[in-house]
Each structure stands twice: as C-alpha cells, then as structure tokens.
Amino acid sequence: MLPDALRLSRLSEHISMGHHPRRVSPAALPIDGRGMIGNMKTTALVSLCGAIDFMCYPRIDSPTLFAALLDGERGGAFSITPREPNANVKQMYLPETNVLLTRFMTRDGVCELLDLMPVAPVATASTVTDAVPNCVLRIVRLVYGRMTLDVRCDPRFDFARATHTARAVEEGVEFVCADGSPPVRLLANVPLSIEEHGARATLEFEEGDCACFAFGAAEGLAEHAANHDAVLAGTIDFWKEWSSRSTYRGRYREVVLRSALTLKLLSSEEFGAIVAAPTFGLPEAQDGARRWDYRFTWIRDAAFSVYALLRLGYTGEAERFMKWIAERSRDCSTHGQLRVMYAVDGEDALAETVLESLVGETPGRVVIGNEARDQIQLDVYGALLDSVYLYNKYGAAISYDGWRHVTRTVDYVVEHWRDPDNGIWEFRNGIRPLLHSRLMCWVTVDRALRLAEKRSLPAPLASWFKTRDEIHRDIHEQFWNDDLQSFVQTPGSTTLDASTLMMPLVRFIGPKDPRWIGTLDAIGRGLRVDPLIFRYTRGSTLDGLPGTEGGFSACSFWYAEALARAGRVDEGRLVFEKMLAYANHVGLFSEEVATSGEALGNFPQALTHLALISAAFQLDRNLDRVHVPWT
C-alpha cells in the first residue's frame, strides 16, 4: 500500500538530478502511485513525481501520447519535477473535484502543482461543451521560499510507434507527427526550448511565482492558457456542482463520492458509455504477465453502472448510458446476439495486437485491443436486462421499439442458455458450462418477466416462465456440490468461483438460504486471503494463462456485501473497511491487489468502484437497521 507521502530521494537511482533529469522508470513507482484527471473525453494519470506518464488522446480509447508508465525510456511523459533530491511529496484532490494537487516540500520552499482538464463552467455547460479545448492545464505556484523545477514535455505519438518533430510557435512548441495525426501544442507563460524533439524549461521560482502550461490541440488553447485562473475556477465550480447532486448521505460519503467522481471521468460526454479502465498493459501478475486493454465498455458492467448512478441521484448519466446500451441492443444481430464489449462510440472494440514499441522493464507482452471481443459470454444478457429493468423501475418506461429489441434478446437466451461459453472471467483456453453465465441467463428471463408484468407488455410469458424455472432447477441440480456444501463453477467439479457471490445480489437465492451460507463459507475458506477474494483457485492452470494474479478487488466488495446481506454485518464491515485501506493515496482502486498489498492490473478500475458503492449502500442499510422488503 502506498504511503501518503513519498520521498523523491527513494527514486534517486532512477533520476539524474542534473539540469535535465531523465524520465522516471515505471519501476520507480507502484501502479497506483498516481492520481487521475479528465474531461469526459479522455483522462491522464499524474504520478507522485509530477509526471503525466499515461495519457491517450484525443479520446480515452485513442493511441497514447504519454506512456512512460509502461516504458520509461520510450513511452513519453510530461514532467514538472523539483531539482531538490530530498523533496517530500503529497498529492490530493481539491475537495469534491477531479482537480489534482501535487505538493513538493523542501526545507527551502513549498511548491504546488495543480493538474486539470478544463470542462465547461456550470452556467454554460449545456451549450459550450464543444468549445472547451481538449487539453491539460498544469499550474505551478511557489507558496513559500524558493525552489528550482525542471520541465520536460516529451510526447510520443501512436503508442510510441510514430516519429515527430517539434517546432517553435508563439508562446510555445508544436509537436507534429510524421503519420499525419493532428499536431498538439504546449503553450506556457515562461520560455520554452526545444531539445530532442521535446520541450524544456527551468523554473527558478521564488515565493509568489506562477507558471501555467497548456497541452493539447491548438484551437482555443492560447485563450485557456492566458486565462488559467478563470478556467481553474470554472472547472472547480463544475465538479463541486456535480458532486453536490449526489443523494448519498451515508457513513461512507467520502469514498462513495470519490468513486462517483472516478466513474464520471471514465464516462464519455459525447456517447454516454463508461469504460472499464483508462489504461492498457498494466500487469495483473507480479511477474509482469496478464496485460490487457480495458479502454472499452463492457455490457457486463451496465447493470452495476446504472444501479450506482441511479442510487447516487445521477439520473442524467444513467439515462445517457441507457441510451448507449439501447443502441447496442438495437444494432445487435437479427437473432439477438450482443458483443461482449464495444468501443466508446459503440463500434467494435479493437482487435488484439501486441505492441513492439512499448516493452518496459517487466517481462510480459503489452497489447492493445482485446481478444475477448469475439468470445461467447452469455452473462452479458443478464447484465443488459438487469440494467433495463432497473432503469424502468427508477427512471423512465421502456419504449415500444425498445421492448421489441428486449424480447428478441430474451428469445435468444431462451434458445442458448445451455450453451458453454467463455464466461465472466473471459477464459482463453476453451468454453465450458459456467455457473455465473447460467445465473445471468436466469436474470435475463426473470427481469424480462418482471418488466412485462409491471408494464403490461406483450410477451410469450409461458415460454419465458418455463425457461426461468428450468434454469433455476439446473443451477441447483447441476452446479451444487454436496461434499463441499457449495455451488461450484462447472457441473461435477470442485472449483469455487467468486462470481458466485452475485447469486444473492441478483436475488436468485435468499441471502440466508442454507445453500447460500454454505457457499459463502466455502468461498471464505478457499478463495480468501484476509479481505482479498481471488476469482478462482490461486496458482491453478484453470484459465490457461501464465502468472499468478492477485485478489480481484470487485470480488472483495461483493463478498463484504454478501456477508452483510447474510446478517454477518460486523464481519462484512471489517472486510469492507480493510479493503478501503487498499485504495491509493487519493482514493483510487486498481483492478487487483497482491497479497503483499501491491496494486495490480489496470488502474483505476470502474468495476471496483461500482462494487464499492453497492457494498456501502448495503452496509448502511444494515447498520441503520433499514429493512428492505424482498421484491
């Protein structure tokens, strides 16, 4: 777990402290040694060293401009670093915003670095969003004493595969890619020089001095750089107003709000989609293996996202996401089959490709795109129908055309629920009959039946009721292991699977049913290390992939919620609060956590923050003794 303050002296072997310190190695900081900024178009990660070392541009699923997080030598970064080797660093968000503050402190001075991506002011957000340049604003202020800082901006276009040139322009430097990509500029109110196709500056600051750097597309950039104080104030106002709309008033307000703010950054203002994570290529195993691209929208996350947004009072975001989902349902094949994941704009996700340009220092191939896009994962239909049902319950009624698309999808599931598939964990070594997929097929039909009855919608009810009952019996008869007194991953196996934790959460089984309590206890014995829950048996060859992964953070929050629902509230609360300690210094969670406490996998991960929100709501209900009828 990363401490709140980190001495840069610990990185001395990775940094040359001359006039032009070289880029920090990705091995110098853990994966979660960063905060995230964004503007609902793209995001950037800002390290505790003051470096933007991961950023895709112009969209969150575009090629990288900065990727030193993956390859410290070739990836590119934009760093603002104190020359003093013993500077202390603290990083925080300005309250209720996504404006990141990094503070460098020495005996001689205190410097503050504010990082943000401008968004439209609250009063005009609905009309001038497109007029706000897609850029990063970095404001450096010395609040005490004196300090020397070195500035390096070294973009690398197209995942560091394309060459570029740098040329001087008024008040800055323009970077022009050889492949014809739109150029980007760095503008500043201090002198910049060009060196090695990058921009350089040295700041000899005394108390009260301030510098501003604006990086992005040329249009509108100069105006924002010149009026940086007003842009900062407008962006702060936007985030505070957005945060104030949260209806959550429970005991975990701070962490729930940070999760909501993170989800907002992972959403697309243009399309309404929410990506799984802003990164690719970060290893899920400590030996550097298991590196995937998560910059896409999984249908599976739909129900979690809609549930969280509605519960927090963000009905507008939920509505826009539902419209995006409805378009995917409308555009699916004529027999009702959906893809597992989509690009932000709803097109097909990229095909998986190994990057030779970003190799890093840790073994393991780095890929863009995701092979799982072509897999069969039957659980996505349950996620789709659960989100449709939730939005109808708490949002707006489904349209006639929308219901036609739903019935087509349900009919597909009625025909295919027995099929083997790759499942929620996206196994790459073959298909098999999986409990979680079967469970979510039950959810598909169950939610469609509920919706048809509540809205008096036309449907082949007899066929759907028959299928729902068949799936229910199949799960209890084929996936129950009497020796283990637990549900198992596949029929006749002894393999436990943490996705089983969804059974009471989707209301398939009562949270105190003896069979469920047996399963909960089996997961606690077999898949748990302290608060960490592993997806399935650790160290196994079950998924056919190299390396041993860490505990899956979302599963740990599901486990905490399942304990609370089962009446074991104190136990669930302890698991939940232990998991909160695995957040990084600004409250962000990675996909996985090693038993050593090291963050693993893509960062930050939406599903983890969604599971946190759900568990927090359930714990509040239990601790406040609020009884929610079974419906």
Image (tube, rainbow, N blue to C red):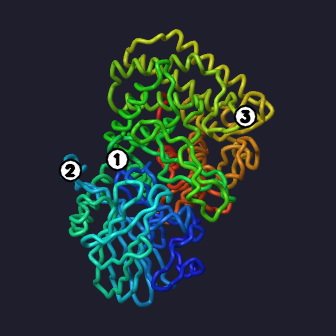
Q: Earlier in the sequence, mark 3 or mark 2?
A: 2
Q: Earlier in the sequence, mark 2 or mark 1?
A: 2
Numbered badge on residue 247: 1
Q: Secondary structure at mark 2?
A: helix
Position above or below: 395 against 287: above
Amino acid type, mark 3: Ser
**x then y, percent, for residue 255:** 45, 56
Position above or below: 516 against 103: above
Amino acid type, mark 2: Val
Of 468 and 227, which appears nearest the observer? Answer: 227
**Residue at the spot 41% in from the left edge and 76% down from the top edge:** 195
* Quadrant of image for the N terminus: bottom right
CA separation, marks 1 and 3?
Answer: 38 Å
Which residue corresponds to mark 2?
Answer: 128
The crowd level at tag 2 (other Cα within 10 Å; few <14, some 14-19, many 20+) is few
**Residue 433 in view in this figure:** yes
Q: Is residue 259 left or right of residue 186?
A: right
Of 383 and 342, which appears nearest the observer? Answer: 342
Numbered badge on residue 486: 3
